[in-house]
Image (spheres, helix red, strand yellow):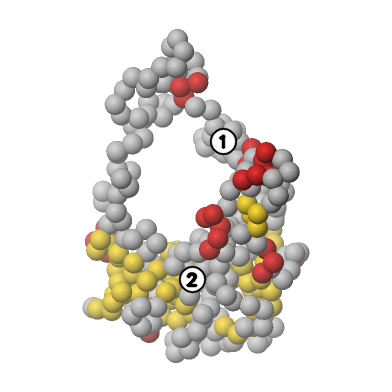
Amino acid sequence: MKQYKPVTPSRRQMTTVDYSVLTKSEPFKSLTVKLKTAAGRNSRGVITVRHQGGGAKKLYRLLDFRQDKLDVPGRVEAIEYDPYRTAFIALVVYRDGERRYVLAAKDLKPGDEIITAAQAPLKTGNRLPLKRIPIGYQVYNVETRPGGGGRLARSAGSYADVLGQEGGYTQLRLSSKEVRLVPGEVMASLGRVSNPEWSLVNIGKAGRSRWLGIRPTVRGTAMNPRDHKYGGGEGRQRRGTRRPKDIWGNITGGRKTRNRKKWSDKLIIQRRPKKR
């Protein structure tokens, strides 16, 4: 982590990730696209997601979550920053000359060689079927169905532990401590996602949140009665209800939001522990 001298109040607590591991500042142009920012608005221009808007201009990097170029070795050309995700990304040039962006694994460096194959060596960054990975290894960018592309363990520093192999399924323990079954034929990358220090970042000041496209959040108790269920009153008032609610009166705490008929429920062996 990079810390700053406390020359101003905002600098006193501010921390940033050490970007010295990055080797390139400009992205590979043909693998970028400009996305239109909606600022939390729907097709009619109505705000449906609050506290979004503004932010610095940025280009979207076209990432290859599938990594379906089988048995073709690739060399890591650069480790780059991606403004649309918390992890770092790697620019890989394959032996046939094609370049693709992939999620960078922790400790992956320029010059390292990676490959996607059924019998790939057990080396960080390589991609192979889950059923070929021994118990105890860490994996990331895990598919949930064959050929569907990585869905699990994609954010900075995250990974899944391989706990067992049985009945054509692999037992994975996710970062949330949930244990679930995943088909053994799906592909997964060895290692853990890069930039594990991201969770330790201290924003430091309000302006930095605005650079990220995050607009201010007003407390409900500071609003008027017509604007929120907690608004109004003389001085500082209590909430007035045992169950926390949002601005529209919907229950926000202690209510399950997962679909009870979710098809993947039968694949969950152990739920993630509840927060106390």
Instruction: Give percent across and percent down for residue 257.
Output: 33, 43
- How many numbered discs? 2
Q: In the image as oriented, which residue stretches furthest toward the front?
A: 6
| Quarter of the image that includes the C terminus | top left
Marks 2 and 1 sit apart, C-alpha to C-alpha, by 31 Å
Up the image or down, 241 lies above or below 5; here it is above
Instruction: Give percent across and percent down for residue 265.
Output: 27, 58
Q: Amino acid at mark 1?
A: His
Up the image or down, 269 lies above or below 74; here it is above
Question: For the residue labelled by badge 1, is the local secondary structure a helix, a strand or a loop?
Answer: loop
Q: Can residue 28 be spotted in the picture?
A: no
Query: Which residue position is annotated with label 2?
Result: 192
In the foreground, 95 or 103: 103
Q: Amino acid at mark 2?
A: Arg
Image side of residue 261 versus residue 87, left or right = left
Instruction: Give percent across and percent down for residue 40.
Output: 57, 39
Query: Which residue position is annotated with label 1?
Result: 51
Of circles 2 and 1, the one toward us is 2
Pointer 2 local density, CA inside 10 Å: few below 14, some 14–19, many at least 20: many
